[in-house]
Amino acid sequence: MRKLIYGMNLSLDGYVSAPGGDINWSEPSDELFQWWLDQERAITLFLYGRRLWETMSSYWPTGDQQPDATPAQVEFARNWRDTPKVVFSSTIDKVDWNARLFTGDAIAEITRLKAEDGGPMRVGGATLASAAMRAGLIDEYEIVTHPVIVGGGKPFFTPLENWVNLNLVETQTFPGGAHLTRYKTRH
C-alpha cells in the first residue's frame, strides 16, 4: 500500500495562499528549497488539483533554463518533469509534462492508487487535499509554517467531521524563520 503525503508552505494563520492566490510570502530560503527538493525526490507520483497544476506547470517545465536558476532549482525542475503526475480536474482539456488527466471521482481514484504497490505519493493543492483529508486518506502531513500572517485566503486544513490524531515525527527551523513540522496519522 502506498503512503499519501500532504505537505505545503503555509502562513502562521494557516493559509497556503493569501487572498487573490498570492504566494509571494512563501519564498523559501536556499536551505528550505533544498529540503523540499529532497522530499520531492522520494515521491513516485504527484497528485495535483487544477490550480496547483496550473501554478507548477507554468514554471517548472523550463525552470532549469532560467538564467538565475540555482543548482537545486535545476534539479527540482528535472525531478518535477520526470516524476509521473495525475491532475484531477473537470475543467482542463489536456495536460503534459509526464502527467495524465483524471476527470472522474477523485477520492475513488486516490483510494485505488493508494492500494497499489509503489512508493509514496504527494497530494498537492488545498482543495484536492481537503477531499482526501475528509476521506481519511492522508498518512503524513508536512507543514512548513512561514512567519507571516496573511489574514485570509486558501486554508491548508478543511473542516472535518472527526478528529485526526497525529504523532509528531520531526521539527526543523530554517533560515528566515520557516518552521517544519511533520506528523504521521495515527491509524
Image (spheres, rainbow, N blue to C red):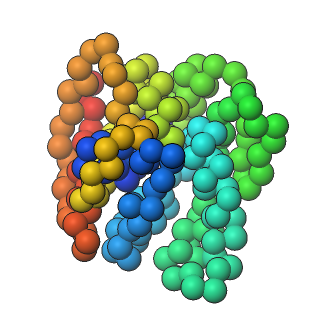
- The structure residue drawn at horizontal position 27% and vertical position 38%, both measured from the top left corner, is 184
The percent position of residue 100, horizontal first and vertical second, equals: 73, 41
Residue 58 placement, left or right of 153: right
Using the rendered view, name the quadrant where residue 176 is placed: bottom left
Left or right of 64 in this view: 3: left
Residue 67 spot, x, y in % from top left: 63, 86
Q: Is residue 98 left or right of residue 133?
A: right
* Looking at the image, residue 59 lies above or below residue 184: below
Q: Picture coordinates of residue 159 (x, y %)? A: 34, 22
Q: Residue furthest top?
A: 161
Report if residue 102 is visible in the image: no
Tag count in the figure? 0
Vertical order, 178 against 91 (above or below): below
Q: Is residue 60 left or right of residue 178?
A: right
Q: Residue at x 19, y 56 (%)?
A: 171
Residue at the bottom extreme, as displayed: 67
Instruction: Judge whether 157 appears above or below 171 on screen.
Output: above
**Residue 66 spot, x, y in % from top left:** 64, 80
Quadrant location of the C terminus? Answer: top left
Q: Quadrant of residue 116?
A: top right
Nearest to the observer: residue 3 or residue 60: 60
| Residue shown at the point (31%, 13%) measured from the top left | 161
Residue drawn where x is 68% and y is 32% of the image: 89
Q: Is residue 49 visible?
A: yes
